[in-house]
Amino acid sequence: MRAREFAFGFCAAIAGRALIPRLLLLKFGRDVKRLNEGDYSGLLAAYSDDFVLHFNEGDHRWSGDWIGKAGVERFLQNFTAAGIQGQIRQIALSGPPWAMTLWARFDDHADAPDGTRIYENRDVLVLRTRWGKIIEQDDFYADTARITTLDRKLTELGISALA
């Protein structure tokens, strides 16, 4: 009987671990859909109070470290004001539930008011969590020069960075 209980518990643990990335993809997929509509509240709730976003350094409005919920809120305000649209393609994870590391494939783009595509990129987001809250995030882009070009185009369109 003990062997059967052990086998059942082992299988349940494996199945549960396989289910976590799918559940996270569903949760963050909904949050990104809302972000695309201008509502970043679902994403903001996932970050801890002492969260740090390390974003690509450069001559653009998103450059540098964004610290705390107030910092990430300003970042997300600039993101939505720019009209950037994104989609999470895949999530992978490692570590125990209380200290997971997640990797998310995130594709994003932005169009000018006339519908012309002014930005498109592929990204990998590396997120570290503590007890279910995101505490740190590093964003890696396929082409970082595209971010600077987007910022220049937004300025030409009269879309200023938010303070």
Image: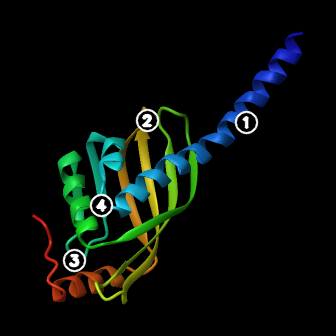
The residue that mark 3 highlights is 60
The residue that mark 2 highlights is 132
Going from N to C along the chain, the mark reached first, 3 or 1, is 1
Q: Is residue 4 above or below residue 40?
A: above
Q: Secondary structure at mark 4?
A: loop
Q: Amino acid at mark 2?
A: Gly
Q: Secondary structure at mark 1?
A: helix
Q: Amino acid at mark 1?
A: Ala
The residue that mark 4 highlights is 38
Going from N to C along the chain, the mark reached first, 3 or 2, is 3
Tell me which corner region of the image, top left, top right, bottom left or bottom right, holds residue 120: bottom left
Q: Amino acid at mark 4?
A: Gly
**Horizontal and vertical percent for residue 9?**
76, 22
Marks 3 and 2 close (CB-CB < 8 Å): no
Q: Secondary structure at mark 3?
A: loop
The C terminus lies in which quarter of the figure? bottom left
Marks 1 and 4 close (CB-CB < 8 Å): no
Q: Locate residue 29 relative to residue 119 in the image: left or right.
A: right
Marks 1 and 2 close (CB-CB < 8 Å): no
How far apart marks 2 and 4 lie (CA) works out to 24 Å
Q: Is residue 96 above or below residue 105?
A: above
Q: Amino acid at mark 3?
A: His
Going from N to C along the chain, the mark reached first, 3 or 4, is 4
Kindly identify the residue that appears in the image at 21 percent across and 86 percent down.
152
Q: Is residue 109 above or below residue 105?
A: below
How far apart marks 1 and 2 lie (CA) works out to 20 Å
The residue that mark 1 highlights is 15
Q: How many marks?
A: 4
Going from N to C along the chain, the mark reached first, 2 or 4, is 4
| Mark 3 neighbour class, 10 Å CA radius: few under 14, some 14 to 19, many 20 or more | some
